[in-house]
Structures are given as structure tokens and as C-alpha cells.
Image (tube, rainbow, N blue to C red):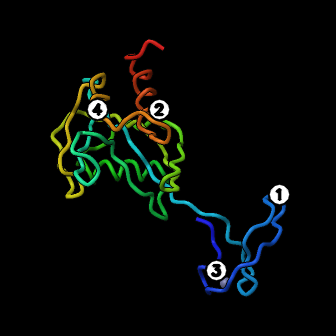
Amino acid sequence: MHYNYCPKCGMKLTDKMAGDDGKVPFCERCGQYWFDSFSSCCIVLVANQYHEIALLRQMYMSDQFASFVSGYITPGENAEESAVREVKEELGIDIERLEYAGTYWFAAKELLMHGFIGFASKADFRLSSEVDSAAWVSALKAPETMFPDRPGNAMYPIYRKYLKTVGLSEE
Ligand SMILES: [Zn+2]
């Protein structure tokens, strides 16, 4: 998000040089720069000991088992805490080991996605009301229903890292 008005006092911002960053919107009244901002999310591929991954079906997005757990990082927590919390909230699953899987820019929503692979023991899901259903799906079959592999979809780079990590890909 690019600021034209000060989010604190509402005054129109002026461009002011800010060192190496060049011109940045500045509030004369508050004496503060307002750098472009974006939200941070976590996205977690949850996998069990049988090489199955958790796919979520959320009817407002798709009628397929198409997505991984994801959610906004809230102020005060780090990306890892957010990943563990979201998996617990959405699936009722406890992550036993978390691996970082890189960051991805999602331009359509101006989001920085923090990717993780979360390893857990297979258990029944206890779903939040945000999730219509979820399934443990054989990892190699997951792409049959996952959202399509296209630029901006962080699921696939994380998925490929997972395959490599557990020795399911030949790369
Ligand atoms: Zn201001």
C-alpha cells in the first residue's frame, strides 16, 4: 500500500528524500516517513509420516481440496509462531517440526508469504469454521486438486521443496 495521506493525522503527505530509499511520503505535522506497506502471511504445507499432506477445501475459494493452511501474521508473533498457531486453529493439528521454505511475494494481494513445511503425526482433523473440509492426500497426488501452478502461487515452490526434503522427487 502506498500512502498519500498520513494514517495518523490525515494530513496530505509530501515526498521527501530518505537516504538510499529516495523520495518517500512524509508527514510534515508528525515528522514521520510513511514507507509503502504490505501484509505478512504464513503458508504451511502440513505433512504426516505417511507422505500425505493436508489439503483444505474452502468453498469461498474453490470446491476442491485446493489449498494449504495460511493466515495473517499478527503483531507480536514471529512467522514460525504464526505458522504453528494457524495449523492448530484451522486443522487442530500440532506441528512437531517446522522447516522454513522461503518467502514469496503475492502481488494480487500485496502479501509477503512466509512458506513453511510442518511435520505432524497423522491424526483426525478438528476443523475451524473457516475450513469446510480437509483431507490427508498422498503427496504425489496432491497436484490433482491443488490450485494451478502459476506465478504467484507459493504452494508449488513449497511443495517441490517438500518432495525433495522427503526424497520423493528425483531432482
Ligand atoms: Zn501526520
Residue 6 has which mark?
Answer: 3
State the residue at coordinates (44%, 21%): 164
Q: What residue type is labelled 2?
A: Pro
Q: In this view, does 160 lie above or below 70?
A: above
Q: Residues within 10 Å of mark 1 (few under 14, many from 20)?
A: few
C-beta proximity under 8 Å, tags 1 and 2: no
State the residue at coordinates (71%, 79%): 13
Q: Residues within 10 Å of mark 2 (few under 14, many from 20)?
A: some
Q: Which amino acid does label 3 sit on?
A: Cys
3 vs 4, front mark? 3
Q: Is mark 1 within 8 Å of ligand 1?
A: no
* Cα–Cα gap, marks 1 and 2: 32 Å
* Cα–Cα gap, marks 2 and 3: 37 Å
* Cα–Cα gap, marks 3 and 4: 44 Å
Q: How crowded is mark 4: few (under 14 residues within 10 Å), some or many (20 or more)?
A: many
Residue receiving disc 1:
20
